[in-house]
Amino acid sequence: MVSTLWACVLAGCDDSPRPTPDGGVPPPPVDSGTTDAGSAPWDGGSTALEEFGNWVDRGAYAPCALVGDGTHACETLDSSGFDLSACDPAALAQVPPVGVFQAGLREEGLLADGGTQAVFSAVGFMLRDDGGTSTLAGQALVTQETEDGRFFLAMRSTTPPMNTTIALAGCQAPSTGIITGCFVRCTNNAPRRKGTFEAHRMTWPQGEPESSGGLQLRAEAHVALGRPVDVYVAKQHAYVVSTHTPTSNGGLTVFDVSDPAHPVFKASISIPGDSYWNGVWAQDDALYVASSVSGVIVFDITQPAEPAFLRSLPSGLYGVHTVLVHGQRLFATNNEGRTDIFDVSTPLAPVALQSIALPEEYSLGGPHDLFVYEDRLYISNAQGGYSIMEISDLENVRHLGQYAYPDVYSHHSAVGTFAGRTIAFEGGEFAASHLRVLDVTDPANIVKIGEYRMRPVTSIHNLILKGDHLYIAWYQEGLRVLDVSNPTRPREVAHFNTFRETDPGRTDHLFQGAFGVRLPGDGHLYVADAPRGLLIFNEPQ
């Protein structure tokens, strides 16, 4: 079983923000191993779990196939290019032709020895009944057959140097909100990929209410700049950063949240040509913003409602993706494959200390995000996996261990101590990415001891660990709160479904919904949601 990042090709690659804790110097490590759903605290015992990767192959999704080699389907872009004789048109006739869907694509790939292996990728589509444009992979549909028991969608992109076509032919509707069928992807009218798909409508998981566990939405504030992806709360103000979109620059938006139930817009800052701002952190009177152009941008927030630009800390051709402050050090993930470290004992005047990189054999992908705990740097290194480095002496940085798997895309993590064990909660990105619980007490022998999954076509994003609760921004799955007092058995105790198909600005992109989450200690949770903006919840007790 091998997966692929074809999702990048189909829907475009993107990503976002950071770890815990919020604001200032973190407290010393404490043992988070308190009572879970059972009758006794976790004793530190565990069983090593087998690693299957993000996607679990359940076989072909539907009993359909292309006609011939698929050339006919590529040329005609209608359902006649598929053999649907074993399908269930009566069930498809009951499917409303509306909604936002994410589809997992299963392809039978050929091996050098003549065998086959299942390859996974993903694509989204959005069907509209309000006069808006229906899309597949972000492109307007050129064919839509969604009546009389048929379900067929096709798009064609004519961007040079090649024409790309994707077509989905529905076959079955095994349960509410799920469609299965066959697909083909063509380049210049020649079939290049084919197989079966399973599409899930991104309404709330079947049977779930909007919220549980006492989570209540206290306030919602629209962010006009780009796509909101991260938030940091300091000095009773929420600082929301956004990445640019095809129709709007990104930037920084500031809200006064001294009354969290009534946030007040104060300012927005955007720089044309430099507005892919993906991460944010504050330290005393300094605000640090991760820019894909300028590196780290430093603002003075002595007047918190009026950030004043001070300087930028350049970081190569591709800037910085995320930032984090631990103690008196600022860490920035450099998009050229390094982690830049600054002394911020004087927060408004950072001083460069060191720029470190993983050993070449672990460097694939580059650092996407990071977490610092007990003089160790935990690097989410995208396709390179999850790496741990000893950083107590910046002149003698050592690589201690790595955790990887065939379809790895390590994105974000948080680390704590439970029953005397050092436990990392690691999340990936792209369809089927989920939570892994890793015992990293011995970095040279990292062991998976738990996991938590949602629907097989959605992606986890950012997470924060506070005590024995893990708060997760999970894109279309919204905000999820897990009791991890027994790390081997994460247990959901609260949720809020932030994703609504009808919100203005929704697209068929995988990266939609809850991006970033913060707990500043004021009794509230702050979530950056695209496109809803800043969402403020009570912190459940």
Image (tube, rainbow, N blue to C red):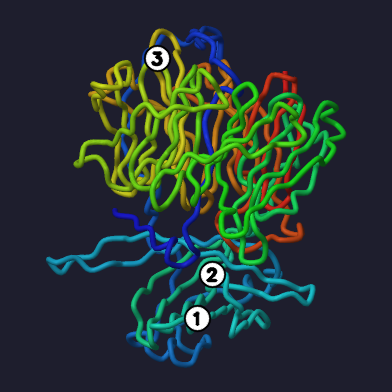
Instruction: Looking at the picture, tell me which residue is in the foreground, 53 or 13.
Output: 13
Q: Earlier in the sequence, mark 1 or mark 2?
A: 2
Q: Callout 2: 10 Å neighbours few (<14), some, many (20+)?
A: many
Judge from the rendering whether residue 324 lies leftward or rightward of residue 494; answer left or right.
left
Q: Circles 1 and 2: CB distance less than 8 Å?
A: yes
Rendered location of residue 269, percent (x, y): 69, 48
Asked if one can make out residue 205 in the rendered structure from this viewpoint, the answer is no
In the rendered image, the vertical position of residue 58 relative to residue 375, given as above or below? below
Q: Disc 3 to disc 2, how far (Cα)?
A: 43 Å
The disc labelled 2 sits on which kind of residue?
Ala
In the rendered image, the vertical position of residue 413 relative to residue 513, given as above or below? above
Asked if one can make out residue 3 in the rendered structure from this viewpoint, the answer is yes
Residue found 40% across the figure and 47% down from its top = 335
Residue found 70% across the figure and 33% down from its top = 526
Judge from the rendering whether residue 476 lies leftward or rightward of residue 46; answer left or right.
right
Mark 3, residue position: 374
Mark 2, residue position: 137
In the rendered image, the vertical position of residue 122 relative to residue 72, given as above or below? above
The disc labelled 3 sits on which kind of residue?
Glu
Q: Disc 1 to disc 2, how far (Cα)?
A: 10 Å
Mark 1, residue position: 157
The disc labelled 1 sits on which kind of residue?
Ser
